[in-house]
Amino acid sequence: MSNDNKKTMMGWAPNAAPPTPGQPQQPAPPPWGQQPPAPQPPAPQPWEAQQPPAPQPPAPQPWTPPGAPQQQPPPWGAQPPTPQQPPPPQWGAPPPGQQPPPPQWGAPPPQQGQQPPWGAPPPGQQPPPMQPSWGGPPAQFGAPTGVPFGNQSAARRGIQGADATQGSSARLRFIRLTYIHLFGAILGFIALEYFLLKTTGGQKIAKPLVDFALGTPELGPAPRWHWGVVLAVFTALSFVAHYLAENTRSKPLHYLGLVLYTIGEALIFVPLLTIVVWVTADMVASGKGDPNIIRDAAYITLGVFGALTASVFIFKKDFSFLRTALVVGGAAAAGLIVLSLVFGFNLGIVFSIAMVLLAAGQILYETSQIMAHEDPENYVGASLSLFASVALLFWYVIRILLKLRSE
């Protein structure tokens, strides 16, 4: 065997065989003991040899009705248009989709170009400030507020700018409650007088008062200063009752003042009604018949009070201007009563007629205050003042009838 064949069989002989035609030439293997060369990336194919990408289906377009303008897509790379937000509604404007209410009957027509939005305040006027809720912080110092109920310095001053048409519901409630309490005070007065003059228990209270004020058959007439003491006690009780009913904030104190004044009026009427009972008994014994002084005085008082009240409610006249005249007249009447007690002269029928006129003026004044100026929560105090005027009228009507029918 030749050496070439041996080298070929052992595998280390060089590959000297010629390549076959049509077959790509293989690179020669590296010599024994050397690292094989790193693989090279394939050469890029020419552009014409690359395969075209597969066609993609067109994106679906939104359906548009026939004749609608076609929306052009934005150019490539441009930002899509930002959706526009609707402008915020104006202050007081109605919500979207809601119509403003129709104008009220009698309202002036809106002017062209000056109609404010629905619910907005009129031009040149600021919206009213929000009132603090219950328990909220108080208003700023110095802010204009109403006169607080129970303010002693302005309890009788009245509400600024009030009339019968403002706050009609509160005013009607106040008027109704005032006359209900007045009616209750009159009923209480009648019940107390019946108890003091007609019952045994009441006689135990009335007889000492009558004996002190008028005297007894055994001791004769009482001194005039005794009646002065009775008037002084009644005046002090009246002052306390008016203060509790008009110048305090507590409703129980208001009712306590009304009850005290009703009791005081019932007690001070006991001597006068006792005189009427004595005169009536003498006239019946002499055959002149019953003069019915108390009954007729009650009818006259009720008729005068009703006529004065109706005149204020019908004509809506404000009698606040009578305040000064009533104060002066009351002071003059009190001075004359004191002088009569000190010097011992009697106040005749002329004085009684003047006091009836003074009581009528007080009823007019109090009624107009109740109708327009009184605090709507002071119905107990208003009924007490009105009851005092009615009692004063009843007192002097009795004195006039007693004087006229006893002669």
Image: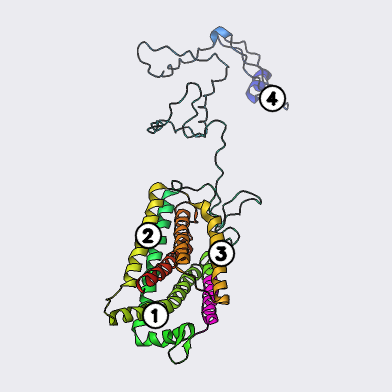
| SS at mark 4 in the image | loop
Which range of residues does the magenta coloring cover?
Answer: 222-240
Q: Which residue is mark 1?
A: 274
Q: Is residue 26 above or below residue 352?
A: above
Q: How is the image coloured?
A: rainbow
Q: Is residue 129 above or below residue 66?
A: below
Crowding near pointer 4: few (<14 within 10 Å), some, many (20+)?
Answer: few
> Which quarter of the rendering shows the C terminus?
bottom left
Residue type at mark 2: give it: Val
Q: Which residue is mark 4?
A: 36
Place of residue 1 in the rendered image (x, y in percent of width and height, measured from the top left): 64, 20
Spatial CA distance of label 1 from label 3 is: 28 Å
Residue type at mark 4: give it: Pro
6 on left or right of 385: right
Q: Which residue is mark 3?
A: 332
| SS at mark 1 in the image | helix
Q: Which residue is mark 2?
A: 304
Crowding near pointer 1: few (<14 within 10 Å), some, many (20+)?
Answer: some
